[in-house]
Amino acid sequence: MASYKEPSFAERTALAQQAREKALAKLQARPAIDPEQVAARLAALEAKKAAEVARREARRAEMAQAKADKIAAREAALAAALAAAPKPKPQLTEAEKKAARDARFAARKARK
């Protein structure tokens, strides 16, 4: 049985050159790209992009509408809460407070 023989530098470069030539021949053997297919692919890609943009815009509009509905609901709830809340008593002036105190005092004296 023969032992393994390490390939020389010349053999390695020759093998690399053959591989390059084989790859180039394979590449040149491919048929040319049909311009109609390229145009069809580009048209499909543009249609896909347009559909994505339309879907994104529809989603944005839907989100904006949901946000507006939520704000309107909050405002309606706030208005209902304000309408149901008891009205605050008007603040009395010092003179009105003194008159009320004097009236209570006089009523207490009259009861005795």
Image (tube, grey):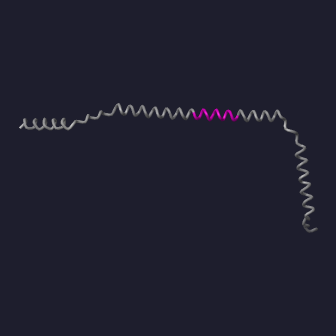
Q: Which x, y percent locates residue 111?
A: 7, 36
Q: Is 95 left, or right, of 15 in this rendering?
A: left
Question: Quarter of the image containing the N terminus?
Answer: bottom right
Q: Residue at x 72, y 34 (%)?
A: 46
Front position in the image: 28 or 2: 28
Q: Residue at x 50, y 33 (%)?
A: 68
Picture layout, residue 101 above or below residue 1: above
Residue 54 occupies which quadrant of the picture? top right
Q: Is 97 left, or right, of 77 in this rendering?
A: left
Residue 49 in the magenta stretch? The answer is yes
Q: Residue at x 77, y 35 (%)?
A: 41
Front position in the image: 104 or 80: 104
Question: Quarter of the image containing the C terminus?
Answer: top left
Residue 86 occupies which quadrant of the picture? top left
Q: Which x, y percent locates residue 36?
A: 82, 32
- Magenta span: predominant SS is helix
Q: Which residues are magenta?
A: 48-60
Picture layout, residue 55 above or below residue 7: above
Q: Residue at x 92, y 61 (%)?
A: 11
The residue positioned farthest toward the left in the image shown: 112
Q: Is 47 left, or right, of 69 in this rendering?
A: right
Q: How many marks?
A: 0
Residue 31 occupies which quadrant of the picture? top right
Q: Which x, y percent locates residue 108?
A: 10, 37
Picture layout, residue 24 above or below residue 82: below
Residue 61 in the magenta stretch? The answer is no
